[in-house]
Image (tube, rainbow, N blue to C red):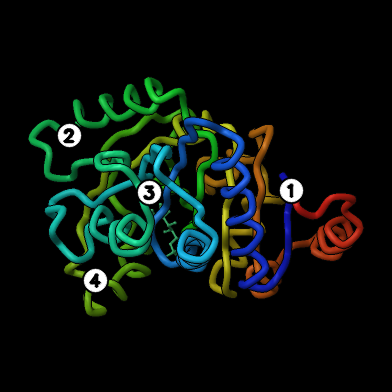
Amino acid sequence: MEVIIADDHELATLVADAIERLLRDDSAPVLGLATGSSPLSVYDELTRRHERQGLSFAEVRAFMLDEYVGLPASHPQSYRNVIDTELVSRVDFAEDAVHGLDGMAEDLVAASSDYDHAIAEAGGIDLQILGIGTDGHIAFNEPGSSLASRTRVKTLAHQTRIDNARFFDGNVDRVPQHCLTQGLGTIMEARHLVLIATGGHKAEAVHQMVEGPISSMWPATVMQMHPHATVLVDDAAASRLQLGDYYRQTYASKLDKERF
Ligand code: F6R
């Protein structure tokens, strides 16, 4: 794993640079999109580049990571609605180019396996944006998830529902209990994993993900097995890293800062 410790603005710039390179170099790029707070500054930066520098998403296909079960797409907190608001409506994706899981599907099992097939048919995901939960989840693969899991229904951990209550008027009872999520095995097939974490509340999860033993108790640790995973963290999220000084030194002396 490559670990980059920088401030929020630099993190967003670096991730937007990687996405811009992909969009300019690849004629049919496939992006993996996360929701939640972590990628918001990246989406703002991509929107800025679209408006001011003509960065185009017209040829991009995208797949979302997860969705709540039982929230219609029109619900303000459905991930479909959130990604539309935060990114899709602000740039120039073609119609139907952004795929999401249907948390209202009658057959959630079929919807899940269809989703894995759709990703494969698109040629796989080139760059997957990720955040991490305080309990170490990526997408909604909660502690105990199989490290080889595919897209499926999961029950949200109580901690995740508490963490996400801020999006539901602070009321944990309004946070759905179930979700559809890409599996860890699905995520591991993306060609480049780019995870963003900021804030001290993520410090333990970041430490475990980067430096802990690989274990389904900290699902993000599976990323240690990925050949191209980049973890971008601010000082607070990096505060429990045992090798924090080493990562800072490595990045400061990196020969080509743009490439990760
Ligand atoms: C969202 C997702 C989740 C979040 C994680 C962190 O699509 O897959 O894994 O990335 O819960 O959430 P934030 O960024 O809100 O702290």
Q: Is residue 193 above or below residue 35?
A: above
Q: CA distance from mark 2 to mark 3?
A: 15 Å
x and y percentages locating residue 195 in the rendered image: 57, 52
Earlier-in-chain disc, 1 versus 3? 1
Q: Is residue 234 left or right of residue 139?
A: right
Q: CA distance from mark 4 to mark 2?
A: 24 Å
Which residue does the numbered mark 1 point to in the structure image? Answer: 2
- What residue sits 62% from the left and 51% below the top? 209
Say few, some or many: other residues with alpha carbon within 10 Å of mark 2 (under 14 / 14 to 19 / 20 or more).
some
Circle count: 4
Which residue does the numbered mark 3 point to in the structure image? Answer: 140
Earlier-in-chain disc, 3 versus 4? 3
Front of the two marks 3 and 4 = 3
Amino acid type, mark 4: Val
Which secondary structure, mark 1?
strand
Q: Is residue 25 above or below residue 47?
A: above
Q: Are marks 4 and 2 in contact (CB under 8 Å)?
A: no
Which secondary structure, mark 3?
loop
Q: CA distance from mark 2 to mark 1?
A: 35 Å
x and y percentages locating residue 103 in the rendered image: 18, 45
Front of the two marks 1 and 3 = 1
Q: Are marks 2 and 3 in contact (CB under 8 Å)?
A: no
Quadrant holding ligand 1? bottom left
Amino acid type, mark 1: Glu
Which residue does the numbered mark 2 point to in the structure image? Answer: 108
Foreground of the two, 193 or 21: 21
Which secondary structure, mark 2?
helix
- What residue sits 33% from the left and 46% below the top? 66
Q: Is residue 154 left or right of residue 20?
A: left
Earlier-in-chain disc, 2 versus 1? 1
